[in-house]
Image (cartoon, rainbow, N blue to C red):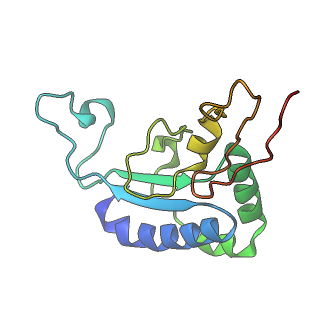
Amino acid sequence: MKKRHVTRYLDVARGWGRLFLEHGGRSHKEYVAANLTGAGLVPFTDEVEIRRGQVLLFSVAECDSKAAFKRTIKAMEADARMADLDVQPPLFNMRRMLCGEFTLLRDSTKSKRRSSQHRTALPKRRARGRRRTGEYRRTTAPRRRKQAAVVRRR
């Protein structure tokens, strides 16, 4: 994208992010590339062509699950305010845009609240020391630790 279009892009991204959060998205973030040539590493510019006067932007739209993301996008497409975000002429060449879907591998944030991917990926554990009696404890989300019904085998 050309540097001169970044402010217009941010206006569109702010509106898109607001709609995304309104319709069920968890977070929406926009990044601009700061350092594309890392010392001792393969420079980013070797893989992606960035022309003179252009910047590289990166956007992240996060939902609780793939199904939630699909629902959110479908609701956004039905929203009449999306037409206001259509900029003519386009701010960047859509043929150079890269899109992908990623699954969270590890989250190192300081927040006590953990993402839903962690909650669904964790196995259900048996309570320690109760294996012989047949009592099991099942916990829900880490932020709301509640003990489920206790089942005894006789």
Of the pair 17 and 50, the residue shown nearer to us: 17
**From what the image shows, is residue 73 above or below residue 95?**
below
Residue 50 position (above or below residue 144): above
Where the C terminus falls, by quadrant? top right
Residue positioned 31% across, 67% down in the render: 4
Q: Nearer the viewer, residue 39 or 140?
A: 140
104 horizontally vs 150: left or right: left
Tell how many labels: 0
Residue 60: x percent and y percent?
Answer: 48, 53
Where residue 88 appears, x then y in whole percent? 55, 67
Single out the residue that lies furthest toward the top.
Answer: 132
Q: Quadrant of residue 16?
A: bottom right
Looking at the rendering, which quadrant does residue 43 occupy? top left
Question: Does any portion of residue 86 appear in the rendered image?
Answer: no
Whether residue 118 appears in this view of the structure is yes
Horizontally, is 140 left or right of 10 in the view? right
Q: Is residue 144 above or below residue 135?
A: below
Q: Which residue, as the protein is rendered here, is positioned at the far left?
A: 39
Q: Residue at 53% x, 41% y: name it.
A: 99
User: Which of 25 and 129 lies nearest the eye of the viewer?
Assistant: 129
Q: Tell me where residue 13 appears, x and y as whole percent.
A: 49, 67
Q: Quadrant of the N terminus?
A: bottom left
For residue 34, side relative to residue 97 (left or right): left
Q: Residue at x 29, y 62 (%)?
A: 3
Task: Report x, y in % for residue 119.
Answer: 61, 44
Front residue of this view, candidates 135 and 12 = 135
- Residue at (45% x, 60% y) in the render: 29
